[in-house]
Image (cartoon, rainbow, N blue to C red):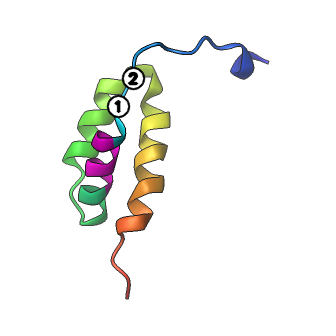
Amino acid sequence: MGLFNRKSAQTAIATGAEIDAAAKALATGEDTLANQLCDRAGADSRAVAMAILARSVDYAPQG
């Protein structure tokens, strides 16, 4: 399968702090940081978007 044969990148696409900041902003309705990270990620934008979305759940307002 092609999915398992991919070479891993040696450079970080986005740091945990960047994903965390974008997730916090996204939880409050601001999508600029998330869009910037996804644009910068290029071919890996889906993976970055999913990481941001998954992390944003922790910051979603409860109520």
| Proximity of marks 1 and 2: CB atoms separated by less than 8 Å | yes
- Eyeballing the image, is 59 above or below 33? below
**Apparent side of residue 7 relative to residue 53 in the rendered image (left or right):** right
- The residue pinned by badge 2 equals 12
Q: Residue sitting at 42 percent across and 42 percent down?
A: 49
Mark 2 lies on a secondary structure that is loop
Residue 4, by quadrant, is top right
Q: In this figure, what is the number of numbered marks?
A: 2
Residue at the far bottom in the pictured view: 63
- The residue pinned by badge 1 equals 14
Q: Position of residue 25 (x, y in %)?
A: 23, 57
Prevailing secondary structure class for the magenta stretch in the rendered image: helix
* Quadrant where the image shows the C terminus: bottom left
Residue at the far right in the pictured view: 1
Q: Which residues are magenta?
A: 17-23
- Eyeballing the image, is 15 above or below 26? above
Q: Residue sitting at 48 percent across and 54 percent down?
A: 54
Q: Amino acid at mark 1?
A: Ala
